[in-house]
Amino acid sequence: MPTRTDYGDSLITPQLQPGMTVTQDGFGLIQVQAKYKWDVSQIGNFTASFSRRETSAPEPYEYCKLWKAELSVEKNGVATVTADFCGIDERQNGPDRTYPQVAATVGSSSQPIESHPNFVTVNADYGGLVNELAGFPPLKGGYVNNPSTNPNNALWTPFVASRGATQGFQFVGFLPNQTQADIDARGINVKAGIKNYYKPQLTLRVLQYIANENEALTMASYVGWTNPGPLWNLPEEYEKLGKVGVGGYDGNPSYTELWNDKTNPGFLCTSCSVELYGDIHKVTTELMLSGIAGWDPDIYPHLVD
């Protein structure tokens, strides 16, 4: 006695079943899951019939391509294929890439006080801080107890002469007041003992899906480079975080012309991963915003827009 009675479609080719599921992430990525019934005699063709990057999703999502599929054999010689497809919805941000998903993390890192832009002269105006911290070292180095010229009690290495050579001075630290007269003249020296300061540090994690493989891998090749943001398709709202003075946000500093010419504000790409996802590429980049001193263009290569 036959255990199976055939009627309707022979299932020689996979037949789409009702219940297709479509998911969109709001940034342009479309994911489709569809189920198919298939005759078990044909499952040897599973990988050919459901080929990654080649097999298209059902209408109207043909632009989505297969990225994985699962086959299960059921009773009566019928197999079920669960296929997952993905693609880029051109109606949201065009067919080339999804709109970037940006997650911002803000922290700080300890830096030597000598790297502060206002250490010897006022080069940056941010938050109303407009005084130099140590000023230039005295002509012979060491320490000059003068509240007018050395209000923060900066101490430098002493002058050392060797066969007529001039030696530069190195900052030692800010001293506490030395006498009661110092306190009367200067008040409390709140910078006494300060050797470091916390430099603001903002990192952006940018996730996007890119159609063109060359574009995705080119982006990965720029790890270690700096750019104001367009290289990584940053939205304009996030690009403003790296702009100096006019065009940025209220918390962004403004610099003197001399200092500004030496800074390289923008984002340093610290990592980039590229993952093939169906027929598109999942690209995740980590971008570190420069501190108030910018990225040194002599150290970090800069891609000009």
Image (tube, grey):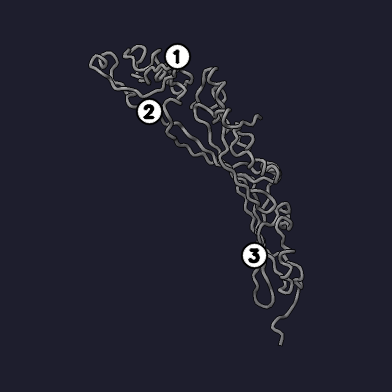
Say which quarter of the image contains residue 39: bottom right
Query: Which amino acid lies under the numbered mark 1 shown in the image of this protein?
Result: Gly
Residue at left offset 45%, top offset 37%: 107
Say which quarter of the image contains residue 166: top left
Q: Nearer the viewer, residue 292 or 143?
A: 143
> Disc 3 to disc 2, how far (Cα)?
60 Å
Q: Nearer the viewer, residue 293 or 84?
A: 293
Mark 3 lies on a secondary structure that is strand
Q: Where is residue 215 in the image (x, y as percent from the top left)?
A: 69, 42
State which tag comes first along the sequence, 1 or 2: 1
Residue that badge 2 annotates:
195
Mark 2 lies on a secondary structure that is loop
Quarter the C terminus occupies:
top right
Residue at left offset 44%, top offset 23%: 127
Q: In the orientation shown, which residue stands out farthest toward the left? A: 180
Quarter the N terminus occupies:
bottom right
Can residue 101 be spotted in the picture? no
Q: Position of residue 5 (x, y in %)?
A: 72, 80
Left or right relative to 131: residue 234 = right
Say which quarter of the image contains residue 91: top right
Left or right relative to 17: residue 299 = left
In this picture, is 137 found above or below 26? above
> Disc 1 to disc 2, how far (Cα)?
31 Å
Determine contact: label 3, label 2, CB under 8 Å.
no
**CA neighbours of label 3 inside 10 A, class few (<14), some (14 to 19), many (20+):** few
Query: Which amino acid lies under the numbered mark 3 shown in the image of this protein?
Result: Glu
Q: Nearer the viewer, residue 150 or 281?
A: 150
Residue that badge 3 annotates:
70
**Which label was assigned to residue 164?**
1
**CA neighbours of label 1 inside 10 A, class few (<14), some (14 to 19), many (20+):** few
